[in-house]
Amino acid sequence: MFLLFLSLFLVAIFAGFFGALVGIGGGIVIVPVLTLVFHMPIHHAIAASIVSVIATSIAGALSYVDQQITNVRLGMFLEIATTGGALIGAFVGVMMQGWVLSLIFGALIMFMAVVSYRSRETDDKMIAADSFKTGGVDKISRKLDLQGEYHDEAANREVSYHATRAIEGGLVSSLAGIGSGLLGIGGGVIKVAAMNSMMNVPMKVSVATSKFMIGVTAATSAIVYLLAGAVNLYIVGPVALGTMLGATIGSNVMNKLHSKVIKIIFFVIMIYLGFSMLANGLRSGAGIKFPTIL
Amino acid sequence: MQSKTEQTETQYINRIVGIILATGMYVTIGLYAAGLILALIEDSRIPSTAHQYFPSISVFISSLTHLDARTFLYLGTLSLILTPVSRVFISIFAFWKEHDFKYVGVTSVVFVIILISVIIGSVFKIAIG
């Protein structure tokens, strides 16, 4: 049991570190690794992942840098959408067959990898052009005061911004919630995309605010999984501790990197894990075999 | 642009949220670490029913005093889940104190959704084959 605890712990440190860098809860690494390497039922993997996603989120949100960058009001507003989605997602996830979840998981993370890769260039350029505060502000964003300012270490200057398209951002964020409940991922990738690409919020604010929201979103899903009987406590323990440690290290490195580097690393790992999960789902669901490394 | 008072309000809320998260994290780390160490001392195998642990309060208290690993791991998981939940709950009052009633409403809606998840999880049980 010591070796199992240790290997789960080490894998979780890596997942937490990586997750903190790109603003996801690390679930996108944990679920595939627990199912593909540790051969656990996907429901157990999802439940363990969603609990550790909370751990990542707490550890990340504690870093001093993150607290300065996070927009608490924007986070609170979008949490309505993400927790609502999480509730629906967890309910469906508990009911659904494992191999179907595996297929959905694989397809979704490959899709998100591509979406994120395409917006690769914009952030550094937009900071330079000051275009985060010039977009048209909608009624809800103005009413709820969805704006702010942060110090960008890489660009070495204050960046102020005004959020826009609050309704659209909320709708997309609810998908992130569904993803959290259904697949045990933080859904951070979708939330970051909703804020960064749709609501015109800078990448680093989107990542920090997303991490802030992930805890509450994941807690909503985790409550359903725990009470429904899918949380294996002996797996959750080492995985949660490891992700916390990894996330703490990752958050401290995050603001020092340019978002371009973060996105490229993220793209490569996502495509690979997505392919492996698709192969896994097809194997156990339809008996089709693909060559994979894991 | 934000005025000076708004800046202080935001900092005030951020500080409260930070204290809640830090406390929750250290309690969780302590409980998980205790649970894992007890598990290593207790047995070399994971119980097959590890995921179906819903102790009643009386069983809970007696297993705590008997240093049952599962109970500590369960409590760790609970404190981890309750940390962001209590963050939401206390934020309601923090926004209230700042007379930001729009966000009292926004935060209350989030809290109600979390309460609904308790009902959903209690009613539907999972079947893992």
Image (tube, coloured by chain):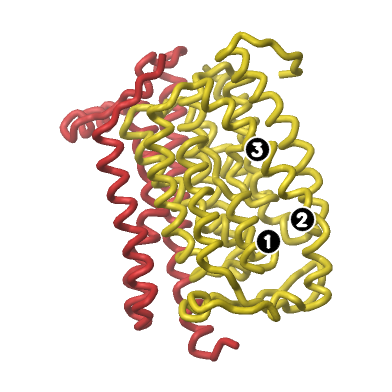
Residue that mark 1 sits on: A197
Q: x%, y% of residue B124?
A: 28, 31
The tint chain B carries is red
Choose the circle earlier in sequence order: 1 or 2: 2
Which residue: 32% across, 44% down?
Answer: B117
Q: How far apart are marks 3 and 2 (CA)?
A: 16 Å
- Label 1 lies in what chain? A
Tell which chain the image draws in yellow.
A
Whole-percent x, y for residue A146 in the image: 54, 75
* Mark 3 crowdedness (10 Å alpha carbons): few <14, some 14-19, many ≥20: many
Find disc 2 in the rendering and name its residue.
Answer: A119
Q: In this view, does B59 lie to the left or right of A190?
A: left
Q: Which amino acid does label 1 sit on?
A: Ser
Chain bearing tag 3 is A
**Mark found first going from the N terminus, 1 or 3:** 3
Mark 1–mark 2 CB contact (< 8 Å): yes
**In this rendering, position of residue A7 left or right of residue B21:** right
Residue tagged 3: A109
Disc nearer the start of the sequence (3/2): 3
Q: What residue type is labelled 3?
A: Ile
Taking B15 as reference, is A103 left or right? right
Task: Tell me the SS state at disc 2.
Answer: loop
Q: Which amino acid does label 2 sit on?
A: Ser
